[in-house]
Image: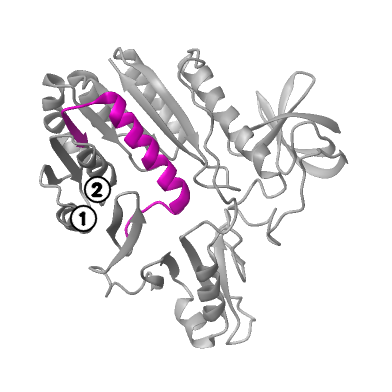
Amino acid sequence: MLINVEKLVFPGRALARSDGKVIFVDGLLPGESAEVELVREYARHSEARLIRIVEPSDERIEPACPYAGRCPGCVYQHLAYPGEVHAKHAQFVNVLEHKLKISVESFVQPPVAAPEPLGYRSRIRLHGARAGENAADDDYLLGYRMADRSIIDIERCALACAPINQELLAFRRDPQLMKQVAGHELLLRWTEHDGVKALLSSDRSDNRQCMQEMTALGPLQSPVRGFFQVNPAVAGLLTGEFSGLLEKIQCDCAVDLYCGVGVFALLAADKGVTHVLGVDNDIKALRCAKKNAAALGFKQVEWFGAKAAAVAGEAIAPLRESNGLLVVDPPRRGLEREVVRAICQTLPPHVVYVSCSVDTMVRDAAELLKAGYKINYARMFDMFPRTPYFETMLWFTR
């Protein structure tokens, strides 16, 4: 059947209609017409497979990666980068408008594009395996895991920075290293200060090792296996924007409820917030956070090791009596129900919500709006170019 694509929807799928029914298909762009084959039909939509493009978009480009269309990571390699940023911003706006049932014109800011859409990742996680039962003894795979649990063997990743790809090449050229990684994960992480660290999931001898990340505050320590944003350039743009929000809020105290190594808590201290509390259940991350605060001379920051859900009410309560700010940057699964409940009961004057998952973010935002909050600011940051994902930051006030 022949279709005409209307738009791109999260997570990077083309949407078309036929006889009033929505059709989703991968690999197409807005404005393109194509011949497709229906592969699954549901009550409200169908899924199709691309057969051939009849009329391509002017924004279609040749993918920079030879694995495009097969590797599960990238969905926008065939789209000129400005078009990707536009599509992601439209998806962000659409989710806010349709899930929250509000007009966004007064608070949604223009999207923030990445300075470089390729070669930006400072960390990748690969999987190793034997090539197959009948493969030679020295024939191994090293690459990304597919949805069916198989592994796509890659020689380099177009999203990874050059030093990581150099390390990956060194691994692939060494039969002993390839044998060693079979059946395990390989984490490759780079910082300008430390170079590339290659870490096998089977080896935990580096549990107390840290790496030095450069930030707007200067060098910060982070556990070698711990979380840190994979796109240093866009992370810098986001933290700069957060500092700008702090200047508008002018809060007296702040709580960073998923603080990690303390980035947002330390930014608050840097802007003169007189009392700051950072909470996290990752003891290794908190150990780095304390070192970071000491190195920067910020004595007004306290750190507490606990799960956010267990202490949210107690941690947030003091914010109500002052012009307090709550910062939440949860994992992809979003806020725990206990945290949402604590926010809605305690009602801190300001909440800044940073998220890498637009679906769980908007779920939690709906609860805050029901509790009487309004959104003053919302922005999309393209932290993960060429992939379907992006970072968002919202500022709620009462």
User: Where does the magenta region start and end?
Assistant: 226-255
Task: Determine whether, in the image, residue 262 is placed left or right of residue 379.
Answer: left
Residue 259 location in percent, x, y?
25, 44
Q: What element carries label 1?
A: helix
Q: Which class describes the residues within 10 Å of circle 1: few (<14), some (14-19), or many (20+)?
A: many
Residue beneath disc 1: 292
Residue at (66% x, 29% y) in the render: 42
Query: Disc count in the image?
Result: 2
Q: Is residue 258 above or below residue 86?
A: below
Residue 118 or residue 144, whichever sits in front = 118
Viewer-side label of 1, 2: 1
Quadrant of the rendering where the N terminus is positioned: top right
Residue 182 or residue 376, whichever sits in front = 376
Residue 207 in which image quadrant: bottom left
Residue kind at label 2, given as amino acid type: Gly
Task: Determine whether, in the image, residue 141 is placed left or right of residue 289.
Answer: right
Q: Is residue 266 above or below residue 393?
A: below
Q: Which class describes the residues within 10 Å of circle 2: few (<14), some (14-19), or many (20+)?
A: many
Q: Main secondary structure of the magenta part?
A: helix
Residue at (26% x, 49% y) in the render: 260
Q: How far apart are marks 1 and 2 (CA)?
A: 8 Å
The structure's colour scheme is one colour
Residue 69 location in percent, x, y?
70, 53
Quadrant of the rendering where the C terminus is positioned: top left
Q: Is mark 2 on a helix, strand or loop?
A: loop
Residue kind at label 1, given as amino acid type: Asn
Give yes or no for residue 254 being in the magenta stretch: yes
Residue 190 or residue 370, whichever sits in front = 190
Marks 1 and 2 close (CB-CB < 8 Å): yes
Mark closer to the chain start, 1 or 2 = 2
Residue beneath disc 2: 262
Residue 133 or residue 136, whichever sits in front = 136
